[in-house]
Amino acid sequence: MDYKNTLNLPQTKFPMQAGLVQSEPKRLEQWRQAGLYERIQEARAGAPRFVLHDGPPFANGDVHVGTALNKILKDIIVKSRTLRGYQAPYVPGWDCHGLPIEAKVTQELRAKGREDADAATIRQECDAYARRYVDSQRTQFQRLGVLGDWYNPYLTLAPAYEANEVRLFADLVEKGFVYRGKKPVFWSIPYRTALADAEVEYADHVSQSVYVKFKLVGEPNTFVLIWTTTPWTLPANLAVAYNPELQYAYVHANGETYIVANLLIGVIAQKCGWENYQIIRTATADELATLSYDHPFCPRTGRLHGAGFVESSTGTGFVHIAPGHGLEDYQLGLQIGLPIYCPVSDEGRLAPTADLPREQQLPESLVGKSVLEKNNRSEANDAVIALLTEGNALAHREDYHHSYPHCWRSKTPIVFRAVDQWFIRIDHTVPGTGQPFRQVALGAIHGVKWIPDWGINRIKGAVESRPDWCISRQRTWGVPIPAFYGADGEPILSADIVRKAADLFEKHGSNVWFSQTTEELWAACRPAGWTGPEAVNRSQDTLDVWIDSGSSSRAVLMQRPELQHPGDPMGWQADVYLEGSDQHRGWFQSSLLLSLAGNGAPPYRTVLTHGFMVDEDREKISKSKQGQGGYQKPQTADRYVQDYGADVIRLWVASQDYRSDIVVSEERLKKVGETYRLIRNTLRYQLSNLYDFDPAQHTVPGEGLTSLDRWVLGEFGRLEAEVAAAYEAYEFHVVYQKVAQFVAVELSSMYHDIVKDRLYTDAAGSLRRRSTQTALHRILSGLSQMLAPILVFTSDEAWELIPGKPFDSVHLSLWEPGGAVTAESEREAWQILFSIRERAMPELEKARQAKLLGKALEAKLTLVLEGREAEVAAAHSAELREILNVSQLSIEPGVGFVARVERAGGAKCDRCWHWEHDVGQSAAHPTLCARCTVAVSVS
RNA sequence: GGGGGUGUAGCUCAAGUGGUCAGAGCAGUCUCUUUAUAAGGGUCAGGUUGUGGGUUCGAGCCCCACCACCCCUACCA
């Protein structure tokens, strides 16, 4: 007779093969139809709130793996808090304004021959463009298993958002933070606009550096030598700076006399080809202060000034000062009363200005020369160098390799250029505190928790060193700065005006600023009882996009009822912000400054930071490398999802400590795929052995469980507690490590392997089997729950098949970890038993290698034990035999540890494969052991 | 050029205030199983903790220098 079908062999609908790429979209659809996100929020109504505020990605392009990492981490946090009973809403957002979209749209319009499109038209196109990408990115984010309020996100282009952003701006105006000034700012020539610090990327660059002779007035044949990497700024030169702390000397060479810094003489001599130079005498700082020089090609003179920022590491010790082209130059210029002279037009061409008499300015030959570089050369540089050569003012010219700021969009080198712009004054004295805003901000930083803790240094560094915030952009696609200009050209800006504009934006969208006439706008925005000048023009500038996203505390956190912490006066503050570490300078900072200035408090309580994606060589994933065939496939989220499935991607995200860099490689993903299969098979094993288990009827209470089951539940309880703590601390890689280890060791290698015999061969309804099923059921539920934030699809798939579950989705369930605890004495006994097992296994393996036996059940094992081990083993000999999985075990007291293996006696039971002496006692079942005979007759 | 971070077996992670702490899992090897079977069990092997110094009776863990990579920064004018 074939007894195989009398066994309780595993049965389940949970497939071994996941087929994630096909199955995940189905589950996603199931969730969508069920309104899972909404149901979760309803289920947690009244529960304590946990708010993670989303940093808005830019609504352009496909979702990059790095962006996917960020979103997945956020989702893991939200889901894990939800699981623990919090109401954790997730409102995704998108950053919709800005140069990349405007550039793309104008390009498209140009291609369609619509070069004459006006601002309002361009903006409508931009709006449509941004929304298109919001849709496409939304789909990609959802595919990752991220749950949220996807169809009610926050968009920085929404009229209500713009209105609240502008109201926040009004508060800043009211408190005196905002001013208009002419200062050097980053300027993108191709896009004809000022750029924010955060819109600048550093890249390697080769500059044409020149050593230039400035002829001293009244000292024949004597020159001050300056060095610059930007020859095109020389027409703007108004002074020369030296460092009073440095030593300078007169040097005679090639028949001329030069003044340079002592420390640099050697280097300069080599570069300029001074073969037999002589140091004539030192030049004191007092002496230098009296000197003036003739500009090399503009008919004017300048003076020398002491300045601490001049360094002696490179150059000549003298710095050419152009207050219109550098921040330090500008500051020095202000100090000594120089005009902020910037003879470069918006288009990046040299041009005279009204700051100086025309005759003192650049020669006609330079006018119109373009500063913009192509292949490391620019017309302006070439023309200036030609003039210098002509005038015998060029001492040396060489390529200079360094990293230089570039426009993030056009990838061209930016220029520093003084223009009239709107600024936020960072050192503004905060009304009511008497403290400079910068100090207030630094103080507030200490009230926020930064994870990892070095994050505080980053944000402090950013706030300490930042200049005033240039907030105006010469662009169309953005929130207009609601300012006007009077007949005299002076700006008109007040909080009341701005608030009225905000109301207008709220009603009609900010497009009104471009579609209506100045008269109409002024009529709508002019405050009642206005006594100031009347507006004749409106501002054409838009706000820096960092003001957009940085205003989300006002425009989102304070607006949405579901994001408030009821009963907390500061309840609008988010619990967590989570972005890449570059955002210390970016969104973390802009959000902090704006919320502090406008709302009076930081927008967040904890700021979490993650590292960046690097490839297998730990080099950053770069577009250029992609272009050179460095990657086989595009580094988009979708591509990885299509290859591995979202759950594997999520497990990969969880597997690494995200606080440092994240390695993305096929090898790594394949390894994680292995772990995924291990976990999946574990869940499958448990499910498949619960096919006939109804927790309502069959659950065995704690005291009735077998000791082994109590042991495993105790271990599992400890795991749950550790995993819960790891989630709490945002250490998901610890979750991964602990779970993977537990699944591989405690479950797969130990418990599951041991318990197979009971589950398959005991009578289906036997206490021992039901006891083990009780444990499996408990572990399966808990395991699904602790995996749910990471394996969002797989855990739900398993959960669905768990008998008697009280929630229809694991994501709705409440996870209460760390329930069962094994008594200490029982735990100690099991530790001893497993330690004996560990030492006995190799002995069994030796016998196997010697071909004495195949499976352990063919063995009889004799253990010689001493002391406590002997005691425990004797008291638990049945358990010990079971965990060794041998047919026969004999324990003998003795000395030390000896394990003797021989073939088991008796006969092999046809059903359970144990070797027993009681096989054949039943006439009905002559090939069965006594235990199986009972099992067969019961069932 | 400055600031911050990282660097432990092929891969991910561990190793309170320096003292059996060099460990785990995975992958790899050999092997047993056909009652989780495109699964499962067992066995073995793997690292002079980026490099070089130093402090100490004793250092992945403290100090110094250097190297590699990542992030931020500075118009080296």
Image (cartoon, coloured by chain):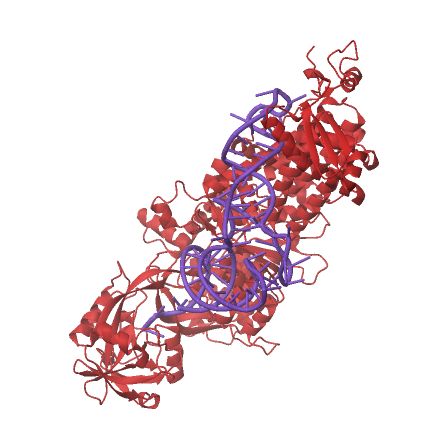
Chain colours: A red, B purple
State the residue at coordinates (43%, 59%): A514
Q: Is residue A239 visible?
A: no
* x then y, percent, for residue A503: 55, 61
In the image, residue A725 sits, relative to residue A912, either above or below, namely below
From the viewer's side, name the closer residue of A79 and A757: A757
State the residue at coordinates (17%, 77%): A391
Left or right: B50 as drawn, with respect to A381:
right
From the viewer's side, name the closer residue of A615 and B15: B15
Identity of the residue furthest to the right in this view: A703
From the viewer's side, name the closer residue of A654 and B43: B43
Q: Which of the image's four quarters has the N terminus of chain A? A: top right
In the image, residue A858 sits, relative to residue A802, either above or below, namely above
* x then y, percent, for residue A397: 23, 69
* x then y, percent, for residue A807: 71, 37
Identity of the residue furthest to the front in this view: A895
In the image, residue A732 sits, relative to residue A401, either above or below, namely above
Left or right: A252 as drawn, with respect to A528:
left
Residue A434 placement: quadrant: bottom right
Left or right: A465 as drawn, with respect to A606:
left
* x then y, percent, for residue A144: 54, 41
Q: Which of the image's four quarters has the C terminus of chain A? A: top right
From the viewer's side, name the closer residue of A863 and A574: A863
State the residue at coordinates (62%, 23%): A852
Q: Is residue A274 visible?
A: yes
